Image (cartoon, rainbow, N blue to C red):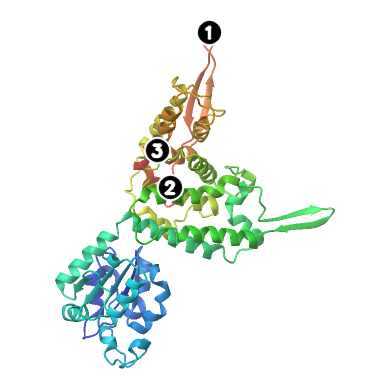
Amino acid sequence: MKILWIEDFGGGVDPSQIAKSIFDNFVGKIISEKWDQENSIQDDFSNFIKDNSLHEIDLIKNYPVFKEKEEDIFEYDYILIDINLSEGLSPREDNPDKYKDDEKFHECAGLYVFNFLVQEGFPFENIAFMSGEEKSTLEFYKKTEESYFSKNPISFGKDPNGYLKISKKLTEMSINPYLILRRGIIEACRFLKNEFENKTGKELDDYLLFYKTTNEIVYEEKEKNNQSEITDNSESIKEYVTSYLIKLESFFPLNPPSDNKTIFYRFVRELAVEWEISKGFLQRKDVEYTDEVEFNFKNFCQNQMKLLRNWTAHNQLSHELTEKEISFYFLIAMRALFNLDINETSRYEKILFSMFEKKLKKEAILKNLADSYFNARKIFEDESYNLQNPRYNEFNNLLSSLGDSTKYLKRNKNVFKKLLSDKSKLFFYQNFWHGLFPTKFKVKPPNVNVNSVRIFVDFDYKNLKDCSFLNELAKSIYNESF
C-alpha cells in the first residue's frame, strides 16, 4: 500500500511514538525493531518504510506542502489527515485564495484537504482523520455550508483506542488482494519504464526480449557490400512499449468495480494482445542464458503469453479469474517482454507475491508433472469429442491443440468449450512447471510377436536456486497448480 500521512506533530507530541502506534503492525513491526530514535521523522521516515517493507508512507506536515501534491492524490491507496496543521506556520501563510485573510485557516486545514479530496473523486472510505481535536472541530465543521460530508467521515482520535483502530484498519487493508494487485502493477510499470528509458540501440534490443519472437527489428547491424548497414527503430519501439505500460498502469481504479470478473478479463486481453505478432518461442541464438532452466523459463514466458492471447481472443479462458491469476499472468508478461535477471526479484514482484500462500513440495513435483500431463493428454482420447491428435507431445503443444480444436470440432462443441474454460486456470499454472521441466520421450523396442512400441514419458527436473525469482514464483503458485 501507499499512504499519504498529513501530520504536523503539534502540541508537543512524540513523532516516533505516534508513528509506531499507528503503523508498526501495518509494516510488520519494523518501526519498533529497526527505527533509530535519533532519526528525523520528517526527513527519514518515508525512506525508512520503503527500504524496509513493501509499503510506502509519504509524510507531509501542512497544507502548503499538500498543495504541491494535489495532482498526485491518486498515487495513494489511503490518506490519513490531521485536522490542525498550523504547527510552524504563521497565520495566513500560503492560504488558498478563498481563505487568504483567515488567520485560523491552518487550524482546520485538514478539513479543507478532505473537501478537496472528496470533490476530486478520491474514495470517501479511503480517507480518515487522525486528530486530537477530532470531535469538537468536526462537529463545528459539519454545520458550515463549506462541508461536503454526505455522511460522517472516518475519524480516529490520538489516543490508545484511536491508534488501535487505525492500526487494525490499515493492517486489514494491507492484505486486500485488489489493492495488492493494483499497487504491484503500478510499481512494475513505473520501474520498468525507468529501467529502459535510457537504453538505445543494441542495449535496448537485448533488453526487449519479446521482439526476439517477432519480425519487428529493434536494432540490427548487417554487413552488405563490405559496408555496415544499421536498422535502428529504438525510439519508435521504446515509445510504443512506454504507451503499453502506461495503459496497464492506469487500468485498475482505486475504487474496485462491483464486477471484478469483467475488468479482470479485459485486463488479460489488453495484457496479452501484443503477442498476436509473436511466434511464441525463442531461438537459442537470440538470447543469453546460464543454464537450461533459464532458457526454458524465458521460452515458457513467450509461449504462455501466446497461448493466453489465443485463449482470450477466442473466449476460451475462464471468466472466473481472481487477483492471483491476474498477478501470475502479469508477472509472466513482464518477464516475456523484458530480459530481466532470473536471480533477482524486483520490488513489484515481491508485492504481487505477497498475496500468495508460499508452499513448495519438491518431492511431489515429478508426480504432479506426470499426473497433470496424463490428465491433459487423456482429453484427446475422449471419444465424445473426436479430437485430432496433437502434432507434438510437449504440454504447451497439448494446450495449443486443445485451443485450436474448437475451430473444427462439430460434436459436443459447447460442452468441450466449457471443459476448456473450467480447466484453463489450472492449465496455465501447470504450463509453468512443464515449461521449466519439459517432457522427454523414450521409445522401448517391441517385444517378440508384439506389433506396438511402448513410449515412456519422463521429465527433465532440476532443482531451483533458493535465491532465484523462479523459486519465489514456484513457491507462490504451487498451491494453485496442483
Q: Quarter-wise, where is residue 105 in the image?
A: bottom left
The reply to whether discs 2 and 3 touch (Cβ–Cβ < 8 Å) is no
Separation of disc 2 and disc 1 at Cα?
55 Å
Q: Count neighbours of disc 1 (C-alpha within 10 A) and say few if under 14, some if 14 to 19, many if 20 or more.
A: few
Question: Who is closer to the viewer here, 397 or 364?
Answer: 397
- Residue tagged 1: 448
Q: Quarter-wise, where is residue 339 in the image?
A: bottom right
Question: Who is closer to the viewer here, 139 or 287?
Answer: 139
Separation of disc 2 and disc 3 at Cα?
16 Å
Q: Which SS class for mark 3? A: helix
Amino acid marked by disc 3: Leu
Residue name at image x 43 percent, y 29 percent: 416
Which label lies toward us, 2 or 1? Answer: 2
Where residue 248 sits: x, y (%)?
A: 47, 57
The number of discs equals 3
Separation of disc 1 and disc 3 at Cα?
41 Å
Q: Count neighbours of disc 3 (C-alpha within 10 A) and say few if under 14, some if 14 to 19, many if 20 or more.
A: some
Residue name at image x 29 percent, y 66 percent: 126
Amino acid marked by disc 2: Tyr
Quadrant of the image containing the N terminus: bottom left
Q: Is residue 394 visible?
A: yes
Q: Which badge, 1 or 3, is on the more N-terminal residue?
A: 3
243 sits to left or right of 91 = right
Where residue 361 sits: x, y (%)?
A: 34, 40
- Residue 379, compared with residue 285, is above or below; it is above
Where residue 401 sits: x, y (%)?
A: 52, 31
- Residue tagged 2: 265
- Residue tagged 3: 426
- Residue 387, compared with residue 311, is above or below; it is above
Q: Which badge, 2 or 3, is on the more N-terminal residue?
A: 2
Which label lies toward us, 2 or 3? Answer: 2
